[in-house]
Image: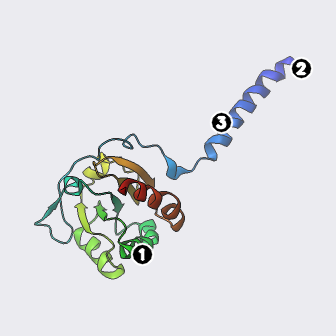
Amino acid sequence: MTRFILPFVIFIILSVFLYKGLGRDTREVPSPLVGRAAPVFVLPLLHEPDKQFSPKQMLGKVWLLNVWASWCGACKDEHPILMELSHQNIVPIVGLDYKDKRADGEMTLARAGDPYNLVAADADGKVGFDYGVYGVPETYVIDKQGIIKYKLIGPVTPQNLRETILPLVAELQK
């Protein structure tokens, strides 16, 4: 009888770990960048490639960095929510067009509308890599000092916008 106890105990322990692991929200992956300065970069603008953007230009403002691409289905799902947020003029939204062709990114925004204050073109994905992008879309809340305060993996939804992003933005804007 005792020879069955050890395998049973191991089975129970493994079951608990499996249950806890499967119950986690994959969009809540901890980021080592949260609480740290946002990586600095200089990229050309999508619509005006002769002009450049750097996060340093946003110092003194709370802002969102939304990583997206024309080929991303979930980005299309979140797009109307970003459009509505843009119309409310609560927080600047900077787009990072990730691993995309310039013409495809421009065409996507021309068709669906452009919620961004500006869009930087990260054609080779190096900036996305520096930000630890797992996949698109991803959204970062960055404070007035350039510190990443929150990272959302996956699309912005009405729920996470209402419950997490906007309250955090309001607190940081004080």
Labels 1 & 3 near each other (Cβ < 8 A): no
Q: Mark 2 or mark 3: which is in front?
A: 3
- As drawn, the residue found furthest toward the front would be 174
Q: Residue at x 79, y 28 (%)?
A: 8
Name the residue nearer the viewer: 136 or 2.
136
Residue labelled with disc 3: 17
Residue visible at 42% across and 43% down in the picture: 31
Indicate how the structure is coloured in the image: rainbow
Q: Position of residue 161 (x, y in %)?
A: 48, 63
Q: Earlier in the sequence, mark 1 or mark 3?
A: 3
Label 3 sits on a secondary structure element that is: helix
Dot 1 amino acid type = Glu
- What residue is disc 2 on? 1
Does residue 108 lie above or below 135 as drawn? below
Question: Viewer-proximal residue, 27 or 102?
Answer: 27
| Point 48% across, 46% down: residue | 29
Mark 1 vs mark 2: in front:
1
Q: Is residue 154 visible?
A: no
Tag shown at residue 84? 1
**Residue 38 visible:** yes
* Residue 87, horizontal then vertical, whole percent: 37, 76
